[in-house]
Image: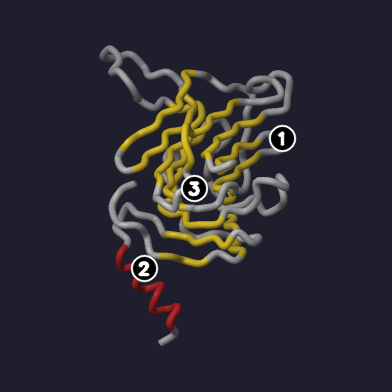
Amino acid sequence: MNIWIVLSLCIVAVLSADEGPCFEFNGNNSYLEFVPDNFDLIDSAHYKLSFMTTQENGIILFARGSHDYEALYVRDGKLNYDLFNPTSNGAGGTFGIHFESNGPVNTNDWFSVEVFRNRRVRRGEARMTGQESPLMSGLVLTHNGVEEEHVREVTLEGVHIQGLVYVGGAGRELSSRVREFKGKIENIWELKNGMRFEDPSRNSGVTRCFPQRGSA
């Protein structure tokens, strides 16, 4: 039997019902493209994934609409989440919102991250019974069981993202500095729609890898 078939069967066997696959990116024009059929990202989104890298720069996740985009990426070793809207009545005018990790994430360790916009995510102190949680946007990074939270209670209006979702790159050059990701990304979810990213519509040089054991 072909060794790659055997490897794929082994990977499937060790995945639990709520775990997604592990993908390895070589950083040389490697990326995954997903087409989210019946998948609403227009006004809000909530992504969750785990990653490992030693590179100082690299795109982890990228999604866009006709004018707006959101991106999760490593720059100068730190994790960044950007939401951009160029219209005058959009989120923040010519710039939406930006979050950055306190320290480096290119340490060859596994990190888990959640990024979300316009989501009612219950965090911090419990609110009074019956009180609705506010809309929040932000980044929550977890490493060795310790959370680092960058979250704002903010409603981002005028943002419309609907289309392809890219992992490990963007399918085209966005920056001469932050290019394709090199490392591993696994267990990729969009929690608002309950979608697990498993079968890409396009695979450019990405291979499967064994998932990590336990939580980051």
Q: Is residue 28 above or below residue 4?
A: above
Looking at the rendered structure, which numbered label has been put on residue 106? 3
Name the amino acid type tagged 1: His
How far apart, in angstroms, are the residues tagged by discs 1 and 3?
A: 30 Å
**Residue drawn where x is 60% and y is 37% of the image:** 70
Q: Nearer the viewer, residue 41 or 96?
A: 96
How far apart, in angstroms, are the residues tagged by discs 2 and 1?
A: 38 Å
Looking at the rendered structure, which numbered label has been put on residue 1? none
Q: Find numbered disc 2 in the image and state the secondary structure of the residue it sits on.
A: helix
How far apart, in angstroms, are the residues tagged by discs 3 and 2?
A: 25 Å
Residue 85 coordinates in the image, percent (x, y): 67, 28
Residue reaching furthest bottom? 1
Badge 2 crowding class, 10 Å Cα cut-off, few under 14, some 14 to 19, many 20 or more, is: some
Question: What residue did someone put label 1 on?
Answer: 67
Residue 132, by quadrant, is top left
Task: Identify the mark nearer the N-term, 1 or 3.
Answer: 1
Task: Identify the mark nearer the N-term, 3 or 2.
Answer: 2
Residue 9 coordinates in the image, percent (x, y): 36, 73
Q: Nearer the viewer, residue 76 or 46?
A: 76
Question: What residue did someone put label 2 on?
Answer: 11
